[in-house]
Image: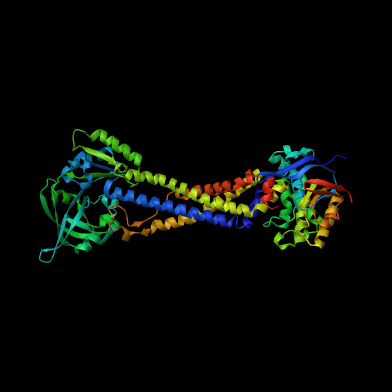
Amino acid sequence: MSALIRIQDLTKQFPMGGRRFTALDGISLEFERGEFSGLVGPSGSGKTTLLNIIGALDNPTRGSAIVLDRDTKTLRHREAARLRNHNLGFIFQTFNLLSVYTVFENVEFPLLLLKMEKSGRRKAVMDALEWVGLTDKVDMRPARLSGGECQRVAVARAMVKNPKIVLADEPTANLDAENSHNILKMMIGLNREFRTTFIFATHDEKVIGYLKRIISLNDGQVVRDEEP
Amino acid sequence: MIRFLLIGLLRDRSRSLFPVLMVSAGVFLTVVLYAYIKGMVGDMVDASARFDTGHVKIVSRAYHLRESQAPNDLALLGVDDLLATIRTIHPRMVWTPRIRFGGLLDVPDANGETRAQGPVAGLAIDLLNKDTPERNILKLDESLVRGRMPEQPDEILISETFGRKLGVPLDKNVTLMSATMYGSMTLHNFTVVGTVHFGMAALDRQLILVDINDAQRALDMTDGAGEILGFKPELDYADQEMRILSQSFNRRFNSAEDEFSPIMHALSEKDLLGEILEMTNIGGGIIIAVFVFAMSIVLWNAGLMNGIRRYGEIGVRLAMGESKGDVYRSMIVEAVCIGIIGSVVGTIFGILTAYWLQYHGLDFTDFMRQSTMLMSGVIRAKVTPFSYVIGFFPGLLASVIGTLFAGIGVFQRQTAQLFKELEV
């Protein structure tokens, strides 16, 4: 099985005052298709930075991140956007739904960027909303939804284009226990059905309980990589 | 995608309604201001043309050098022949002779003793001829306040203000004390048959209007006139055409050796009128430039504020796979839409207001009592075809430039840095 993502000796430093802060320090990792894995560690351990690099939102200082056989460091802005558009889905802690659009329109947005034709778009959006159980809320705006429902819309938006990889940054941080479990069960289902690779950045025990692979980070280094 | 963005734009009032209102307000001000300045300067030029310079003016070379003194001793003679000649050469132009003169007007009481006196600014024009163009040029019928137009020799009109100040009754004799063109004192009796009001303090203060034949007799200027004014029939000034006409006239009639040879000048060659005309033409440009600059700063600020408010949205769009260039372009498309809608709305209200100002004007008469400029106290706007489009320049430019500035931050930052700032 060839790796979807290969992280090789990756270091990321940020300028901070007059010196450089090392967020990631010589990390090497591989992620296979269909993994349900998580980057776990305290704040400042480098979880989000690694997720950003995998998502082609940031470049490593040294080393490389090969995502779907493409070195993110060599990608131009437009190519990076294209990689995200076609193959990556993002789920955020604060949902980040577009408040002026309806549930349907929020989920439809990634497909518009893919220039999918209207009938195909509609079917894909309705299918995605059916997976997350929100077909009765298609015309509602996010302001009228609960936190759990908003995150389900965000999951549908991430999954609607059937991406190969979903990157989820603290997806349950704003949810209560019940909603967290519901969302995670739903993601497990999607992972099984579509063999989508999920990579979480989290320190939430509820999420950690569902992970099939736990990569523990501390001070920018991998301190443990295990399958519970 | 465009439809999707437009839906968002329409639903988000802070991105659509408020910027549109801001642009509309700016465009409205531009249109009204432009039309008002156009009207004000146009009025000034028009009044100068009608009452002073004509579209072209013929005087003697010597008279021209001291024109502000209206020196009738240097007036043109042989005016009938000169008029006949230029009417033949330029039949499409309207030509009319005038004499400007000063003096003292004496108003007698019932016993014939002086009851009131005042200095006059006299204007002698073709007043009695049935086909006189002056009625139209000076809008005499519209300006008549009391009485009637002169029908007989020695009947005159006096300005309403001056008449009331001196207490001149209608159909009574007054006496003009003045000087002939040869320097002798002259006294001439006239009958005031009507009063006029032109709405220009400089004229209304002490004007009397006399028929030119009467003035020629009173001032001993047989076949003479201080000046001959030429107008285009439709009374719309065309600078280039008039300059060419004056050059052609001067080549034929003007002689450097003869100080009494006639010389012609176009309106724009008179004093500061040329500069004023020039100002009229570039005035619109100045207004646009100033407005674009000011509005760009305002819209830039609004764009930045809006950008900060939309950080979440922009971050999500980047994460979904939209490139920074596309985000930037969509912001500019939004700005163009807002610019167009704001410009249309602002122009509609601006034009309506300008039309109102064109018909009613703003009355500054009280502030212009001492004015010596030939300018109406009621300043009106003038709606021209350009008034309909001028607002689109600042409306569109300011919106787009403001967004360009605001969007530079999005475009220049590293994606991850932006992403982090977007709190995503």
Instruction: Please identify the quarter of the rendering in which residue A55 is found.
Output: top right
Q: Is residue B66 left or right of residue B393?
A: left
Q: Position of residue B224 (x, y in %)?
A: 17, 44
Q: In the image, what residue occupies the spot 42% across and 49% down? A: B384
Q: In the image, what residue occupies the spot 41% across and 47% down? A: B283
Instruction: Please identify the quarter of the rendering in which residue A142 is found.
Output: bottom right
Q: Farthest residue toward the bottom?
A: B110
Q: Position of residue A56 (x, y in %)?
A: 73, 43
Q: Nearer the viewer, residue A187 or A42?
A: A42
Q: Position of residue B309 (x, y in %)?
A: 63, 55
Q: In the image, what residue occupies the spot 77% across and 43% down? A: A25
- The answer to whether one can see residue A122 in this image is no
Q: Is residue B179 left or right of residue A58?
A: left
Q: How is the image coloured?
A: rainbow
Q: Is residue A192 left or right of residue A65?
A: right
> On screen, A65 above or below A139?
above
Q: In the image, what residue occupies the spot 36% across and 50% down? A: B41
Q: Is residue B149 left or right of residue A135?
A: left
Q: Position of residue B214 (x, y in %)?
A: 16, 51
Q: Nearer the viewer, residue B62 or A2?
A: A2
- The answer to whether one can see residue B303 in this image is yes
Q: Farthest residue toward the front?
A: A18
> On screen, A22 above or below A204?
above
Total marks drawn?
0
